[in-house]
Image (cartoon, helix red, strand yellow):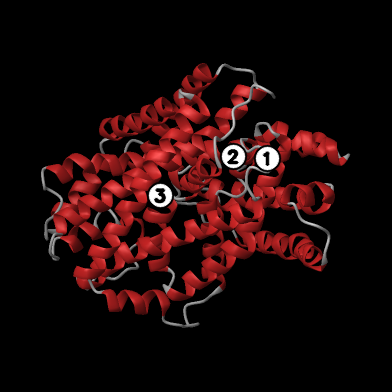
Amino acid sequence: MSNRESFSSRSAFMLTAIGMAVGLGNIWRFPYIMGTNGGAGFLFIYLVTVFSVSMPILIMELIIGRRGQANPVDSVINVARESGVSSKWKIIGLVGVLNNVLTLSFYFVVAGWVLAYVPKLLNGSLITDSSDTVTSSYYSLLSNPLLVIFWQTLCIVFVAGMLLRGVKGGLERAMKIMMPALFVLLVALVVISCTVGNFTATLNFLFRPSTSGITSEVFLVALGQAFFTMGVGGSAGIVFGSYLKKNQTSLASSGLGIALADTSVAALAGFAVFPIVFARGISPALGEELVFITMPLAFSEVPYGAFLYTLFMAMLSMAALTSAIAIFEIPLTWITERLQVARRKAIVLLAGFLWLATMLVSFSFNLLSEFHPLEFINGFETSTLFDLVMFANLEVFFPLGALLVVVFFAYRLDKTIALDELNWKESRITTLLYIHARYLIPLAIVIMMAAS
């Protein structure tokens, strides 16, 4: 353990953890999920679930990771042994590793689409008021397996290359450069978008109090989004916590800071997208095609439209790559430490496996578009491999991983370990927090899994 790398500073840790949380889930997925689920009501439930469910679980993972000082599997084993309980709880780390491999297998697909739009933006072919042109451009990309594979490969090679230098020279350095650039792009886009777009309509959509759109389905979608964007249940907190030295940072304040950054970016993404959408008179409830079809049409009608959409896609590319770098590190640390494989070799092996998995998943939009593996099950008749991987990842394994973390922390972990890592003393507040962790958080997760 003495030769194990660690973060050089609290800021390096925070940038990396935020980089993991802030990705396609915030900027690509969040606006269309919010648009299709009623706006303000969804945003309210999302904020509540992030701070009452996801953030506490993230802090639990950070505690396990910093105490365990190892990959997600060995960290859990180390903490379990210190607590005098079975090492079989290592299943938490294994589920986390599986979660992140599943995430990357579809994440690189979407990231490839984003990068594929870069040359289209440079030649100006996307900013047009012709719906047929924009729609054709999007679907011609998806239906071309070789083109899709090329851009996915580029993403994987970039991420793998960044991580070859290790935690400080690779992961940390990439985040120190890319995350500030991402925030600058996002703020610039929000300012310009709100200036030239319909700012008033956006405010009403995002913040006008209304209970009409709040349903049980909206609650479940918001909870799932909170898990996905924060990465809880995927052992991200365990891995990044394990790269922290004792007393290097307050885990509670770090968890709060990550949650605030994650929700701020999600809200800002709404202000970057919806003013332009409303200025064109387009419905926000248009699904995952919002970024690739709706927005080029919307930007064609506003001043500086080409520049704005280029800025948006640059920001989206940055978010996709920073998040992918951070997520890639999670299974990588398991391979290098648990399986005793040299880092460079482990990166090549993991990148190769993900290249094959990503290629197979991307075929859902072309060569395997008519392949529905679970068509014999009610509700999955038309689900492609891409749909099934996303469902398994977001609706099954992330909640399962989160539930395992909560049960282990609240019922099996020695309470003195948690108090020591948090630098807290036993009090009425900690008692209430443990009640919340023992009953309310597991209940929310079980309800979500049962509904799924």
Residue found at x 61% / y 46% = 397
Q: Looking at the image, is 283 positioned above or below residue 31?
A: below
Q: Is residue 28 above or below residue 170?
A: below
Apparent side of residue 262 relative to residue 318 in the rendered image (left or right): right
Q: Which residue is mark 3?
A: 24
Distance from disc 2 to disc 3, alpha carbons, whole Å, reads 20 Å
Type of the residue with mark 1: Gly
On the image, the x and y values in percent for residue 355 come to 42, 28
Residue 153: mark in rendering: none
Task: Report if the CB atoms under discs 2 and 1 are less than 8 Å apart.
Answer: yes
Residue type at the position of mark 2: Phe
**Which callout, 2 or 1, points at the residue further toward the start of the chain?**
1
Picture layout, residue 420 above or below residue 147: below
Q: Secondary structure at mark 3?
A: helix
Task: Residue lying at the far right in this picture: please name it.
Answer: 84
Which is closer to the viewer, label 3 or label 1?
A: 1
How many neighbours does mark 2 have within 10 angstroms: few (below 14), some (14-19), or many (20 or more)?
Answer: many
Position of 154 with respect to 122 (left or right) is right
Query: What percent of the width, then of the height, locates residue 378?
Result: 54, 55
**Percent x, y for residue 189?**
27, 58
Q: In the image, 231: left or right of 406?
A: left
Quickly name the residue at label 1.
65
Which mark identifies residue 240? 2
Identify residue type, mark 3: Leu
Residue 148 horizontal side relative to residue 334, left or right = left
* Of the two numbered discs 2 and 3 in the rendering, the one whose residue sits closer to the viewer: 2
Q: Earlier in the sequence, mark 3 or mark 1?
A: 3
